[in-house]
Image (cartoon, coloured by chain):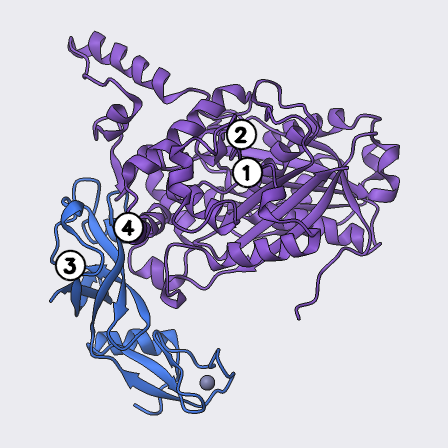
Chain colours: A purple, B blue
Amino acid sequence: MKKKRKLGRGVAIVGAGMSKFGMFKDQDSKDLFADAFREMIVSVDKGVDPKEIDALYLGNFSSDYFMRQSHWGPIISDLVGIAPKPATRTEGACASSALAFREGVFAIASGFYDVVLVGGVEEMSKRTTEEVAEGLALATVPYEGRAGFTFPGVFGAVATAYFAKYGANREHLMNITIKSHNNAPLNPKAQFPITIQDLMNKKKESLKKREGTAPEWQTEKDFLNDPRANPVVAWPMHLFDCCPISDGASCMLLVAEEIAKNFTDDPITVAGLGQGSGRGFHASDDLTYFEATRYAAQEAYGMSGLTPKDIQFSEVHDCFSIAELVHIEDLGFFKPGHGYKAVAEGATRLDGLKPINTSGGLKCKGHPVGATGISQLYEVWTQLRGQAGPRQVPAGDLRFGGAHNLGGTGGTCTFTILERK
Amino acid sequence: MEERPFSDITYEQYLKEERLMGSRCKECDARFVPPRSICVKCFSSDMEWLELKGKGRLAAFTCITIAPPFMIAQGYNRKNPYISGVVELEEGGRVDARIEGLDPNKPEEIKVGMPLKVKYLHTEVGAKKETYLAFEPL
Ligand SMILES: [Zn+2]
């Protein structure tokens, strides 16, 4: 039998912060991380002296490409006054900061450190869309990149395979987009805090002013079905199936569980950790799931002794609408091929049985790739502590929440379960 | 041909010669395309070359309008999209490839499961000659 993994000692999250996500002309990676760090410091209920921090783990995918500047560990460490203490950068494409989180957890669980800062940062908006497409495609499997696949292309292909196998269609994916856009206005950090309904009405008005007539969109799906409003990016992925290009930063303060009470009376602990590696399209016999996510989920459930039913809400890596659908099945929340029906019935809405991406998800909150993993954990931490304001999961007493992060074309996937004891 | 290493570089060289090649593990008969030098079933390194017929079915596809720079250099853009796909080979195994001979502006007409045959795309951008694996309708 497979060994059941556990931490050498418990690890608690006692503080968390993130910058606003968006496209910022006048803020760079350092400015954004400083925003996240300041919020994290203030969030520690009983306060923390930054001098207590032993080390930094920082997720960053590709500032080497996007900003022509690599080696961000020591730069950020110096920014927040941790240097000369150690700083380590982790890279797992869009899952880079989930890996930083894991490394921080392991460093504390091993007994080596007591207080660790983990974070992520990415700055992408200073490149053209085509350049960003190339930069992200660096994280595909080489055979995929050579065949012309971009990230939207990879997930477009997953969608065609899913549609063919299970009979879903674009309208099912629109339910996911509409749901994410309904959550986003409740999140002050979100890049697109606007519902599809409001967006549609705004566009109608501006077209009326400019051209004299407005399109006859009645419903949100009329709007999303109109290629003038929602052009194709990589069939069947259209603009509103895709997460945006974003800048942003996120961070968390991890401490040994045995000293957590020095920082807060309401620590959130790490209940389950999972990470898996994918092999790419050529080595997969079925493109409707991600092997690495299933492996990560199995690890996290095994470590925590929990089942998918126990996870009351979850952030999942919805870089594209189809991705959210596949992940909620891979994580065991819904049976394979049933996810789209559950979504259509409202199960994943904020007031549904299994709220998914209460933050608005990557789609609306934004996806500065290296910062995303810890921003997902930030949302789970905030929800578990009952501090999510108008987007608080209404289920009442929350104990367990999940965060699923995916890098590349499923090459690196993590699933993390946080607990409020 | 027996001398060539079981590598991505050789895989690409064979494509230039219009041959689709994989590797077969002499120890356990596992077959791999693209070729592997280490068998991931039994971990033997005793491999031989395997030539594929180049017939298969479309397992998944996408029509891409926002192209990366190397595809833009080949003339593709928002007005001139292209198709990338995954092809399930007749002998088993899958490859990522360009899909030709179908209209990327009419994706509704492209069907997962449709039979395809291999085509080798020889391109020349500036002084750079490349061959890309592609498939087209049978
Ligand atoms: Zn073998």
Q: Mark 4 highlights which residue?
A: A160
- Front: mark 3 or 1: 1
Q: Mark 2 highlights which residue?
A: A358
Quarter of the image where the C terminus of chain B is located = bottom left
Q: Chain of mark 3?
A: B
Cα distance in 3D space between marks 4 and 3: 17 Å
Identified at 30% across, 18% down, the residue is: A200
- Circle 4 packing at 10 Å, graded few (<14), some (14-19), many (20+), is many
Residue A285 to residue A233: above or below: below
Going by the image, does B64 lie left or right of A12? Answer: left
Identified at 30% across, 13% down, the residue is: A201
Amino acid type, mark 4: Thr
Q: Chain of mark 2?
A: A
Q: Element type at marker 4?
A: helix
First reached walking from the N terminus: tag 4 or tag 2: 4
Q: Mark 3 highlights which residue?
A: B100
Q: Mark 1 highlights which residue?
A: A315
Amino acid type, mark 3: Glu
